[in-house]
Image (tube, rainbow, N blue to C red):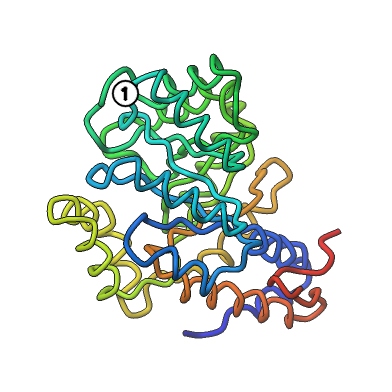
Amino acid sequence: MRNTLHLLSRPGRPRERMKLLSLLDHARYEVLPTEGIEEAVLAHVPTERTVTVTASPRRGLGATLDLTERLAGHGYDVVPHLAARMISGRDELAEICDRLTSHGVRRVFVPGGDAEAAGAYADALALLADLRTLGSPFAEVGITAYPESHPTIHDDLTIQAMWDKRQHATELVSNLTFDPTVLATWLARVRARGVTMPLLLGLPGPVDPARLLAVATRIGVGESTRFLLKHRRTLSRLTTPGGFTGERFLLDCAPALTRPDAAVVGLHVFTFNQVAETEAWRRDLVARLGRTRGAAPPTAAGGPTDMS
């Protein structure tokens, strides 16, 4: 792939370069609770990096909670996905909160989820309201944001949903988008509507199709089909010669990400359990950005030494 980092050495772009270094330093990795992922995280992901654990309808929320607890025990800052439709009601939610807080978990991510509602929670907002009723046990609560149009929900409604959740949540986590113009337009629109929560930008890590298929298969036959259908656009864009790359996407997004009102504070990297490749990619990009004229050298953890 052609190296485009030289573009950030042009006059007026050091601020963008430093912003990208900061985002890469605050990148967190999403993993699926499948066999072998705990060992892969321990082998390839430093404990300074936050790990989020998805919720699988087939495996149940127990798999998410179990992996969260084990990784927290290894010293990671872990963010479990509490998919609202997978939780039956306030009693189960209270048990989950007690279980997680007893293991030092202080952050959660609350999507609606893909499963049929198991009980009281038809959407994320209802669960978020109950978290407040339970005393807001988590310091940080993330909710989903949709730069790309949702397949079944109008854009105005997804932005309204973020507004409705603002009293219960502390951060936005964006779903995947591959178009910098779409992201910039959406971000400006969200901020203009008064949604000011900081944003973690969703970004796919390096994906090998064969390994992604193996991950999907381990999830289960029916669910693997849904998984692959859900991410078919990701696969297509990442495997087409000259197609999407995370590096070029970040470079193209840099002007929008550095706007004073953008409030983009980090990356949420969809690893599809390819954590070794993802961490290697992140470190390589940090190192090359650091070698771009005038940038700060990377720290041992892969970030810049001075972001002031």
Q: Residue at x 53, y 76 (%)?
A: 281
Find residue 240 and report its horizontal and vertical position in percent: 30, 75
Can you say whether 103 is above or below 300 in the image?
A: above
Q: Mark 1 — residue?
A: 88
Left or right, 53 with respect to 88, comes to right
Which of the pair 86/3 is nearer the observer?
Answer: 86
**Which residue ends up furthest to the left in the rendered image?**
221
| Number of numbered callouts drawn | 1
**Which residue ends up furthest to the top in the rendered image?**
133
Find residue 236 and report its horizontal and vertical position in percent: 27, 67
Which of the pair 284/276 is nearer the observer?
Answer: 276
Can you say whether 61 is above or below 192 in the image?
A: below
Left or right, 183 with respect to 261, comes to left
Which of the pair 246/8 is nearer the observer?
Answer: 246
Disc 1 crowd rating (10 Å Cα; few below 14, some 14-19, many 20+) is some
- Indicate the amino acid at tag 1: Ser
Quadrant of the snapshot with the C terminus: bottom right
Left or right, 10 with respect to 80, comes to right
The picture quadrant where one finds residue 260 is top right
Find residue 239 and report its horizontal and vertical position in percent: 31, 74
Can you say whether 127 is above or below 289 in the image?
A: above
Find residue 194 and report its horizontal and vertical position in percent: 62, 26
Which of the pair 43/124 is nearer the observer?
Answer: 43
Q: Residue at x 44, y 50 (%)?
A: 53
Q: Residue at x 22, y 58 (%)?
A: 228
Can you say whether 131 is above or below 144 in the image?
A: above
Secondary structure of the residue carrying tag 1 is loop
